[in-house]
Image (tube, rainbow, N blue to C red):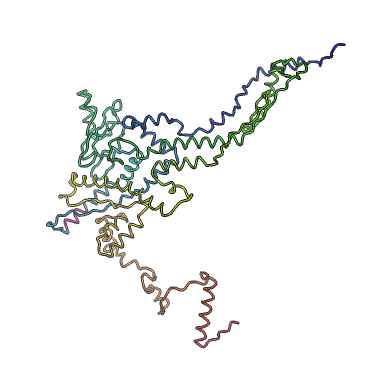
Amino acid sequence: MEDKKAPVNEDFLNYIKNYADVRNIPLSRRKMASLFHTSKTAIDDVSQEKLNTWLRKPDKFYVNIIELSKDLYYKSGEYRSLLNYFIDMARFYYVIDPLFSSDSKMSKEKVKKDLSKISLQLNKMNLKHELAKIYKTCVLEDIFFGYEIEDKDNYFMLKLDPKYCKLVGISDGMYTYAFNLSYFDGNLDLLKTFPEEFQRAYLERSIDKQADLNWFIPDFTKSVVFKINEDDPTILPPFSTMFEPLLDLNDYKKLKKAGAKINNYMLLHQKVPMHDNANKDYQADNFAISAEAMDYFSELVNENLPDEIGSIVSPMEVNPIKLDRDDKTDKVLEATRDVYNASGVSSFIFNNDKNSTGGLTYSVRKDELFVINFYRQVERWLNRKIRYGNIVAKNQWRISLLNVTGMSEDTYLEQLTKSGTFGFSVRGRIAALHGLDYHTLSQSLELENNILDLDTNLIPLASSHTGGLNTAVEQTKGKIEDSGGRPTKETKDLSDSGQANRDSSNSETKSLEGGDTNNE
């Protein structure tokens, strides 16, 4: 008796085959590896190997390190936050101190004239704005190469590209630099915007064609160099120690993001049907459907799945193997602490977990020294400018920057006020904290008191500090007796016990005056 075979639909098989050939889509398009590609960040371009090479030879790769510092400032929130902490801390409050010898007398008219010249010069320089830009550059890059552009009414500091500058010496306690004139090759229009000194040097180089003339040393009285780490001529951004921990933190963030995506990912397993091995001949690849049919139906499933769900086709069992770690520590938080620890700044300043007020205060004081040390370079430059700029006839004045930051303004003002009670000359420094030097202060007082008569026209409101009542109030309401003591609170501001005390006091007063104390 012949075995009856199930009829085969040849048309259906051919249709599947042809349709699958036309619409063939690789199944690898839904590989889970694609999840990791979505976790790329803005600082992935820098590898650990490249960074290690740069940091091992900073004198050779300082330009790359500076560019990385600027790149991280715009792409890393942790790096930007820490640098802004130091940048925003700076306060360039200055006072003009006398340097008269003991045998020279201070002429009143001459002193006023000198203070006026120095004050007008410093105000023309827009000192706070220019120094804020310079200081930000130094925090980012470690060094600022500048050239002063000045006329009768205007002033600004031209920043030069550190790629074309090099330190060549020290004069008057500050670095001097040389500028590479190849900066202007092929860009003569830019040369026309530079000071005449640069144009002359480039012209001499073009005529002589000597390699030594590539490097040009600008006039010492106009050129200026500021450097955070002035003890070492090697150019290295002050917070370059954060670079490696920042790259590690970036890796941990990507892993955490990829892990979160995987935890929310679903994988469907489509098992390929196999023929029963009734004859026990163990035929390999004994599939119950053709490869074309498998591709076709798998494609239909994939086209109707959202991005969070994938599918695979396999004749084998698929069992998950989880590599869960026993340590449940948040590696991102741990890496973030490592970043701030590498900078030398307490992470408590930027995070509120387990902070200590006492420890935080001492940490901030230490950080303030970073800014105050930079003030000393600014003082040296400003006093050099007074000496060489012929601003006053004799070297009898110096500029001093107050040792105050944005974190200590209130405390410093309180200390000055206390010192003033002992007779110390602190008025100039108190005025400096309010943005006034001696000349500006005296001119402001002249304007307010002698010209606008604000000292007589501005009548303070009555208070315990001004004493007595406002005259207008007395004229309106007549004579009012003031028994003294603290002003009485309004009823709405009293507590329950306070209201009870007031009611009791009123009752006693009425009783003494012979009034009725009964409440009806």
| Position of 503 relative to 197 (above/below) | below
Number of numbered discs:
0
Residue 279, given in percent of the width and then of the height, sits at: 77, 15
Q: Main secondary structure of the magenta part?
A: helix
Please report the bounds of the magenta region as a residue range.
109-115
The quadrant the N terminus occupies is top right
The C terminus lies in quadrant: bottom right
Residue drawn where x is 37% and y is 74% of the image: 468
Magenta stretch containing residue 299, yes or no? no
Q: Is residue 2 left or right of residue 138?
A: right
Depth check: give the residue in front, 22 or 61: 61
The quadrant where residue 81 appears: top left
Which quadrant of the figure has residue 451?
bottom left
Q: Residue at x 28, y 62 (%)?
A: 419
**Residue 135 in view, yes or no:** yes
Q: Is residue 126 visible?
A: no
Left-right relation of 104 to 362: left
> Where is residue 369 drawn, in percent x and y?
32, 48
Residue 6 spot, x, y in % from top left: 81, 16
